[in-house]
Image (cartoon, grey):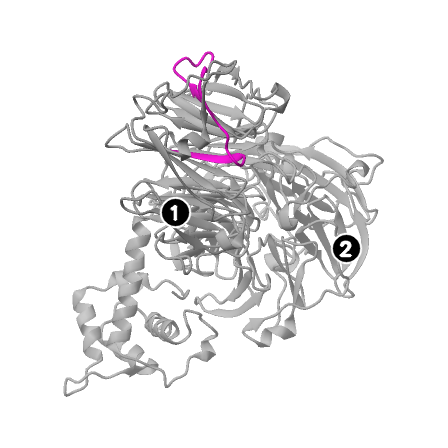
Amino acid sequence: MGTRMEVAQLEERMNIEDYRKLQGLFLDSSGSPRPLSRTEFVDLAWSSVGRGSKEEYGLLFDSVVFTQEHGSLLLDVDAIKEEERVDWGGLSSFLLQELSDKVKNSRTRSGPRWKPVRTLTCPHRDPVQKVLYLHSLGQYLTVSKGGTVCLRDRENMSLLHTHRLQNSTVSPKDLWVTDMVLLHNVHKIAVSFTSKEVCFYDILSHQDFRCKYKLQGLRFTPWCLDYWVDPSDPDQAVLTIGDIGGQVSALYFTSAQISLFERLNVRTDSDSADIIQWDELVRGKHRSCYTVTHRAHTPAWVRKVRYLGSLEAFVSCSTRPQSSVVIGWREKESRSLRVTSFFTKRGVWDMDHHRELNLIATAGVDHQVLLWNPCVTSGPVCVLSGHTGPVTAVRFMQAEQQLISYSKDKVLCLWDIPRQLCVHRLAGVFPKTQEDTHTLLFLHEEQHLLFLSFNSLLVLLERKEEEERSSHEHPVTCVLYNSLFRQVVSSDSASSVICWRVDTGQKVKQFRRCHGNAEISTMALDGTQTRLFTAGADGEVKVWDFNGRCLHRMNAGLGRSVDISQVLLLRRSVLVMGWDRMFTVFRLHSFSQSYVEPSEWKGGVQHRSNVLCAAFQPPQTLVTGSYDGEIIEWNSSTENALKKLRPLAEHREDTHLGVNGKEDADNSIAVTRLFFIPGRTSKGGADLVSCGGSGVVRLWNSAHSRLVGQFTAHNSDLGSIVMTVSPCGKYLVTADREGTLKTWDIQHYYLELHDGITDEPPKLLSSFRPHLDRVMHLETCLHGNRLLVLSASSDCSVALSYLRGDNVGLFGQEEQWCLERTGPLHPQQEAERKPREERGERSPPNETLPDPGPSAGGVKDEGEDCGSNAGDSRKHLSR
């Protein structure tokens, strides 16, 4: 469905009688159906129905035409031709679709809110291979590659017991666990080893984990396990094994609660375990169990196996494209399998099944999450795009009809399956590790817990209690202030844009599905404040007017999904960055077309790591910051690189790229935000400020290409922070992932150049917490005589606050506010006013103007001298 200004405001004001009047407009004098042109429809609807304005009826007509003829893409208003006509069938179908979407949207829950990542005390020295929940004991069980098992308390995650699994087949230094499953109906765990065996340990006597059986003689090393029990008959169970030879083998147990295996010949080893040979099972010597196999994955390794009892089928996956997913169907009254294969471009790391929806989700090496109908092999029923690295794990939330996916670039996404939308995206909060990290994901849905392992490190994500946040239905990704319309513009992960009245907090209008199902990662305004740029995870940047029409589509990702971190507007070009060592540039002359292709930057590639942010200082100074901490200064006119700034010499070569160049913005030296400080020159002290990982803010002198100061604004454990600078350059605002904002007074901070690097922070004016979750973006807003702070958060809210920390409210809240009433002064004004009042002096008339610009005549328009994107996004992109 196309993106437009939401006409639901008009629809909600119309009743049944109004719709009857609308229908009557499409009948001629004889009662026969007739289509209407735009002019006819607007004039007749406005005079006959009323309720709305002519502009609203015109927008409704345009939206119907575009949806029908342009495949849901809204182009420039000039594309609408007067001879276009709409009939009642077209209008009613459109309105029904809109209302249907509204109902679905109201029923869909947004993503969960997570508490800060918690690292658990872990005795493991090698990678964690599996996490299980022992329901009978109320404890969590983990096992490492080296065979160490740990038991944890469910309530506080305290470590209760550790034990080293015994396996006399191999020496302790050669022991390698590949997987583990819980046999809950018989109180055992099955553990697979690289010694080509599966051992069964009792967990009732969990102090020693006594080995009961050893299944030996497997042809290939078992790599993954799965266990299923018939809910109506616990004697019937299936243990499925996937190995590195591409074979899937299943053991059907027919009397599991009596005995898994028969004791044909009493053979034990030094562990006192009964030895079971695989060949005996294949030949049917054990009446209590039998086997079925297939080799559809050969020669690839089987990465994951599942037995689906409802389908009586085995699902497995591999990284071989031809056998990415294989389903082995059990034939009736037979022990043979009928095999069907599913093809993907680069194979699959992981998969999961949703019982109610009967969908299989796959984690693709090609960065995509695919949803499959098990009975349809021709292709997936849905493609969930948004990851920029190989997806390594997927888990369904069965009760929520939601899916969790995790990728190698350490991004966690939560998808709403019915709407096929990413409703929550978590990045920059996970531990910094090497690229080849072994990552495991375990979801305990009943307890709202999510475990992730990073080699030997085990972390926990715990879901927060739901609290009503009223701005968006989904996590908010960006917020801007439009001084022309005196409105706040915010975007979210479900590809919606909402405009708000800053003086009351009311919603003005909403654009839905701006980039289809793709998240909007960032936005920007042009200098006229009449054009909005939105960047989607689909790799496109779109240009909109504030009537909801898409004027241009910019092909930033060259047809692929990319992670866009910033859109920067210069005088004659637009820069887009975030996923590569070079930013993508679009020339002004290219905007004569609706679909805009990128041009070449004359300066070429200068960064050694991904460019994450940029700032512009008129007339021609451009700076760009990258993941490895390097800042490069450019001449925006000649496009040549002039100089490089680096934080510390010892960090020259210690950066590690993630998969496909994707990097973790939590790196302590990564530069994720850059601002020139308005009113300062490079001849003095610090004129450039940056922030990024580990909560650190750095100040630079661009003329001398050196770091002059740095301080920790937020706890380093909280990872990457965001910031903004006030238009006058007096105040710095920072925010972290716990929702805390801090305001710093930098008016007199490092105005002169000194030897060395200062680590003394500027004066902290306020610290407050308007959000429950991570702050994604900050913006300052000069409204009347008050400097306000706008903050967008993953908790789905957009907050408006006074500079000193007093909260105005959340946009969209039930109770409206009124900014026309006098609000609190910011701290500096208050401090200056008190001595005068004590002396009986009156404050000067212009004191309440907190941010006088360079002009002595008073406050300039924000776009003239500075703005939220370091003074550049306000610059006019002339047409």
Rendered-image quadrant of the C terminus: bottom right
| Residue placed most toward the observer, 772 or 600 | 600
- Please tell me which residue is depicted at 78% across the width and 41% down the height of the picture: 653
Residue 314 visible to the viewer: yes
Residue 615, image quadrant: bottom right
Tell me the kind of residue under disc 1: Gly
Image location of residue 605, percent across then percent down: 75, 58
Give the mark nearer the N terminus: 2 vs 1.
Answer: 1
SS class of the residue under badge 2?
Answer: loop
Question: Quick check: marks 2 and 1 in contact, CB under 8 Å?
Answer: no
Rendered-image quadrant of the N terminus: bottom left
- Please tell me which residue is depicted at 63% across the width and 35% down the height of the picture: 432
**Left or right position of 301 against 514:** right
Tell me the residue that label 1 is attached to. Answer: 328
Tell me the residue that label 2 is attached to. Answer: 606
- Please tell me which residue is depicted at 40% across the width and 66% down the height of the picture: 2
Q: Is residue 212 magenta?
A: yes
**Label 2, label 1: how far apart the Cα atoms are:** 52 Å
Which region of the structure is painted magenta?
199-227
| Residue placed most toward the observer, 712 or 640 | 640
- Relative vertical location of residue 74 with respect to residue 764 in this rendering, above or below: below
Q: Is residue 833 magenta?
A: no
Tell me the kind of residue under disc 2: Gln
Image location of residue 95, percent across then percent down: 28, 67
SS class of the residue under badge 1?
Answer: strand
Query: Which residue, as the protein is rendered here, is positioned at the far left?
Result: 30
